[in-house]
Amino acid sequence: MANNEGCGGLGKGGNCICPKCETTIPHQRGVPCQQERCPECGAKMLREGSEHHELWLKKKGRPLD
């Protein structure tokens, strides 16, 4: 099995971003960003580069990186 098969992972590294206040924190290996809470406002975080992050960017009218 590949490093990120079966778990929906995006690999190691990267950041989690808050969809409300846009605070970013480093992603912790083995902990999905959606299980993390923003340290500033308490919202669920999104993983940068994930499908949910891309949908959020589209909704905000921002170009995809």
Image (cartoon, helix red, strand yellow):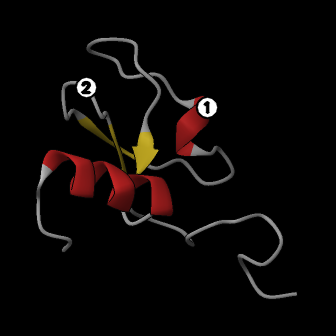
| Identity, as a three-letter code, of the amino acid under mark 1 | Gln
The x and y percentages for residue 34 are 56, 37
In this picture, residue 28 sits left or right of residue 4: left
> Distance from label 2 to label 1 (Cα)?
15 Å
The answer to which image quadrant residue 13 occupies is bottom left
Q: Residue furthest top?
A: 41
**Residue at x 64%, y 44% (from the top left corner):** 31
| Identity, as a three-letter code, of the amino acid under mark 2 | Lys
Q: Which mark is residue 21?
A: none
Comparing marks 2 and 1, which lies closer to the viewer? Answer: 2
User: Which is nearer the N-term, disc 2 or disc 1?
Assistant: 2
**Residue 3, placed above or below residue 51:** below
Q: Disc 1 on helix, strand or loop?
A: helix
In this picture, residue 4 sits left or right of residue 1: left
The answer to which image quadrant residue 18 occupies is top left
**Residue 11, placed above or below residue 46:** below
* Image quarter of the N terminus: bottom right
Mark 1 burial class by Cα count in 10 Å: few <14, some 14-19, many 20+: few
Q: Which residue is the site of mark 1?
A: 35
**Residue at x 31%, y 48% (from the top left corner):** 56
